[in-house]
Image (tube, rainbow, N blue to C red):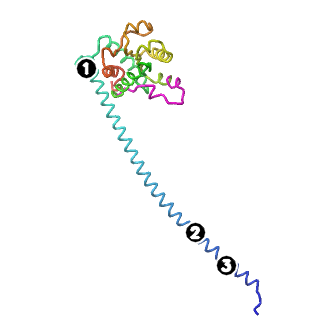
Amino acid sequence: MARFNSNQIKQKMRQAEQKLKQQMRQAEQKLQREVDKVNRENKRKVDAYNRRVDSHNRKVISDYNSEVRKRNTHNRQAIAELNRQLRSGSSGVRYTEPEQQLADRVHTAVGQLDPREYDTFLSYARIDGGDVASALREALEELGVAVWFDEVAIIPGRSQSLQMDAGLRKARSGIALLTPAYLTGRFWTERELGALLGKNVLIPVLHNVTFEDVRKYSGILPDLAGFTTEQDSVEDIAKKIAAAVIVDEAV
């Protein structure tokens, strides 16, 4: 009967253990090589994708900036032509004498101001001026006028009064859409009108009220010149205002 040799068994166990460890290390090294290979390939694909996205974004931005420059050039030319027509009476839309005096004062005053984020601040009473105000804003912006308009500019969840104050500061001029509700002296409209009067660049637009109504409402308005929807369409009024508030930077 063969003798039991414990040392020999232990030696074989150590050898088996070492062999297993070696196999595990080799398997780990192989796996790591595969992981590194996959990571390198993924990085190559991500880098290539990022280059394509970056190139695409640069092109989009370049195209957008080019379009903005073209649009700005077109708007300046259109406004210059509109100014010529309004003052010469060579088109269906023209300034009356009081309107031209107002437009000239506004144009001169705006040209002397520092650049602002908005060309004008549109003040109105929502109860009876919302629809006309929206139409006026759209018509002005189509002509290249940057308009601060509460329904678009005010961000929900933030202080409405602080946002309105910021808009009043940033606007180079103001438009007061005077309606029956506006002339009742509501808190917001009175607050806005007070701030706009401090700018010395205020354009009254009358809707469903007369200059006599405005005279009774307040004696603090700088004058009774302005535009009225009784005489002109909203689109024509927008043209007259745009010609006054947009200053050609090349001039």
Give the mark nearest the N terminus, 3 or 2: 3
Give the position of the C terminus as an image quadrant.
top left
- The numbered dot on residue 85 is 1
Q: Quadrant of residue 214?
A: top left
Is 152 covered by the magenta stretch? yes
The residue segment tinted magenta is 144-164
The residue singled out by tag 2 in the image is: 29
* Residue type (three-letter) at the residue carrying disc 3: Ala
- Residue 104 position (above or below residue 24): above
Query: Residue 219: image x %, image y %?
Result: 44, 7
Within-10-Å neighbours for mark 3: few <14, some 14–19, many 20+: few
- Report how far apart the C-alphas of labels 2 and 1 lie in the structure: 82 Å
Is 74 covered by the magenta stretch? no
Query: Residue 28: image x %, image y %?
Result: 59, 68
The image shows a total of numbered marks equal to 3
Task: Please report contact status of discs 1 and 3: CB closer than 8 Å, yes or no.
Answer: no
Q: Secondary structure at mark 1?
A: helix
Q: Secondary structure at mark 2?
A: helix
Within-10-Å neighbours for mark 1: few <14, some 14–19, many 20+: some
Q: Secondary structure at mark 3?
A: helix
**Of discs 3 and 2, which sits in the foreground?**
3
Query: Residue 93: image x %, image y %?
Result: 26, 19
- Report how far apart the C-alphas of labels 3 and 2 lie in the structure: 20 Å
The residue drawn where x is 68% and y is 79% is 15
